[in-house]
Image: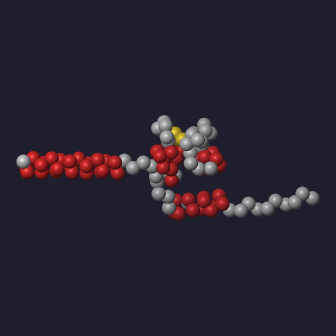
Amino acid sequence: MRRICSVVCSSVFVCLVMVIYTTSSRAQTPFERMDRNGDGQLSQQEFRGSVPVFKRMDRNGDRYISRQEAAGTPLSGDRISPKDGMRDQVQHTFEKQPASKPAE
């Protein structure tokens, strides 16, 4: 009886470890979490960013962000370092625009 119990407990433990391992190895990227309908592209309603950022990422202008358009961005789960130019890009985005001259 003890042997049967130990075999069953061991089997359950192994199955539990396998489930945890496969679930953690398939961790979703931000793109996958936003893609609520699972069609492989983000509509403006699914996108959790601002409209200007959405339009900038939608390179082909079809009103969707595809996986290819998201590649190399934080949406794809890639870690972007300052060496990749992201710091410069972000700073440029938030720089103050020069004040326009008043009409004469």
Dividing the picture into quadrants, the one containing residue 93 is: bottom right
In the rendered image, the quadrant that contains the C terminus is bottom right
The residue positioned 79% from the left and 62% from the top of the image is 99
In the depicted view, which residue is nearer to us: 34 or 82? 34
In the image, residue 20 sits, relative to residue 38, either above or below, namely below
Q: Can residue 18 be seen in this view?
A: yes
Figure quadrant of residue 62: top right
How far across and how far down the image is residue 18, in percent?
Answer: 26, 48
| Residue 92 vertical placement versus 39 (above, below) | below
| Residue 30 place in picture, x, y as percent | 48, 49
Residue 80: x percent and y percent? 50, 58
78 displayed left or right of 16 = right
Q: Looking at the picture, tell me which residue is in the foreground, 18 or 93.
A: 18
Residue occupying image coordinates x 50% and y 50%:
75
Q: In this view, does 14 lie to the left or right of 75?
A: left
Q: Quadrant of residue 94?
A: bottom right
Q: Residue at x 17, y 47 (%)?
A: 11
Point out residue 16 in the picture as x, y percentages from the top left corner. Answer: 25, 49
